[in-house]
Image: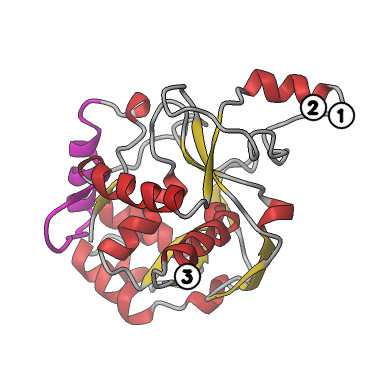
Amino acid sequence: MLRIDDLDTPRNRSGAVDTILNCLEAFGLQWDGEIYYQSRHLEEYRYYLDEFERNLLTYRCGCSRKELADYFATIGTYDENTLYPGICRKKTISGDIPSAIRVKTESTDITFQDELQGLISQNLAHQQGDFILKRKDGIIAYQFAVVIDDASQQINHVVRGCDLLEETPKQIYLQRLLGLPTPKYMHVPVIVDQSGYKLSKQTLATAVDTQSPSLVLFDLLLLLKQNPPYVLNGAKVNEVLNWAIDHWNPDALRLCSTISL
């Protein structure tokens, strides 16, 4: 199933979706059914947000980054990883005032068995704090949207990069609050450059080469420690993919969070 995460409208670029579709097709990756665009499911997200509000599981937060920085300046240092201190948890903020919506977290452990990374346990209240479900600019947060999306699309297995491993307990927490099923998770290593940064537009990584898809797939299989036979180097795309499916061995990546180029 193909899902397009297009909720963060300020970051959406014209032609980006076509680039994604063309890239998938070049690599022989076909999807079933219609493409699922998050931007077409806003009513579903709003419905569940209203459910949370009716059950007193969320609160409005008017804090800006500057206000938080000023607050922490009086008691210590502040960075992006500092937990939100719950300043607005007991406040009543009108819906007419621009504000974020945060979910109340409890001091309970969220534990799950990752198919590659083993047993993961996290106390949300102590390690994440009350996290945002809807930003102050009105955009639905990724953590909240994907929980609804996975349930809507009946996703039962999630395979994704280790850069999202720490976010998974948040999603499981939301699933439990909503009474939704929890998929099985497998977090695979992400490819990083020589400086240890994940390959992305932000780090100016070169775009994937769609002109030589079979060679790229072969190189990726090597990086993923799948030991493809050299005869596949330059074979047709479908031959490389079929071999990869038949010989997929995730154990080679166990307890590994990154792969260096």
User: In the image shown, does 108 or 38 lie closer to the viewer?
Assistant: 108
Residue position for label 1? 76
The location of residue 91, given as percent across then percent down, is 62, 33
Check disc 1 and give the amino acid type: Gly
Q: Position of residue 95 (x, y in %)?
A: 43, 29
**Secondary structure state at the residue bearing disc 3:** strand
Mark 1 in CB contact with mark 3 (< 8 angstroms): no
Residue, x 61% and y 60% (percent of image)?
257
Q: Is residue 36 magenta?
A: yes
Disc 1 crowd rating (10 Å Cα; few below 14, some 14-19, many 20+) is few
Say if residue 70 shows up in the picture: yes
Mark 3 or 2: in front is: 2
Instruction: Specify whether 163 is left or right of 181.
Output: right
Tell me the quarter of the picture where residue 73 sits.
top right
**Drawn side of residue 83 relative to residue 157, left or right:** right
For the residue marked with disc 3, what is the amino acid?
Tyr
- The residue most toward the right is 75
The disc placed on residue 72 is 2
- The label nearer to you, 1 versus 3, is 1
Question: Residue at coordinates 57% horizontally, 61% vertically from top-left?
Answer: 169
Q: Which residue is mark 3?
A: 185
* Cα distance in 3D space between marks 2 and 1: 5 Å
What kind of element bears circle 2? helix
